[in-house]
Amino acid sequence: MAELLTCMDEACCSGSSDETTGYVLVIGATNKVDAIDSALRRPGRFDCEILVGIPDESAREEILIMRTRDCSHKLDGSIDLRKIARSTLGFVGADLEALVGKVVELAFQRIMDEMEPESSNDSMSDDESWWKEHWSPQQKNKFTIKMSDFEVL
């Protein structure tokens, strides 16, 4: 930390007035603002600090829209992203991404559980790889993510 502060002080304060000073851009990120050395945060070291807080309900809804965009053709009409955003207070983007990923897994498992009895009459019922076969259009249409998949979590 001392070396960083020395270099920063030398970069901004050294040299004669005849020299053109360049610009130095320092970007740092932390989720533990209280752990930052106070010497680093004293006035004159950085022009500004940008605090990125936890997203509010509308921001969480936007994040959910972005995270479900890839699977939008698989979303059931019952899904209410605003309701999900309302119930995920304190979630950040990574949390919402993980939530969507988990819901996709749950939906896939639900569909596989529904399909297994259908295929038990087939000759592949003894084979554990029955689900790897090509899916019929009817089976593909069954793969939708429902609001109930979100509510399970």
Image: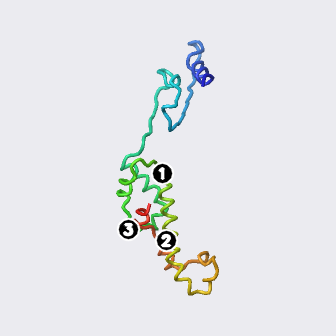
Residue 110, disc? 2
Nearest to the observer: residue 152 or residue 70: 152
Q: Is residue 63 above or below residue 102?
A: above
The image shows residue 46 at horizontal and vertical percentages of 50, 25
Q: Position of residue 47 (x, y in %)?
A: 47, 26
In the figure, is residue 84 to the left or right of 37?
Answer: left
Quadrant of the rendering where the C terminus is positioned: bottom left
User: Which residue is at a point 50% across and 64% down the rendered structure image?
Assistant: 104
Who's the residue at 54% across and 34% down the image?
28
Within 10 Å of disc 3 (Cα), the crowding (few <14, some 14-19, many 20+) is: few
User: Quadrant of the rendered structure where residue 123 is?
Assistant: bottom right
From this view, report whether residue 13 is shown above or below residue 63: above
The colour scheme used to paint the residues is rainbow
Q: Which residue is mark 3?
A: 77
Q: Earlier in the sequence, mark 3 or mark 2?
A: 3
- Tag on residue 82? none
What's under tag 2, amino acid-wise? Arg
Q: Nearer the viewer, residue 143 or 31?
A: 31
* Whole-number angstrom distance, CA of label 3 to CA of label 2: 17 Å
What's the amino acid at mark 3?
Answer: Gly
- Name the residue that disc number 1 marks: 95
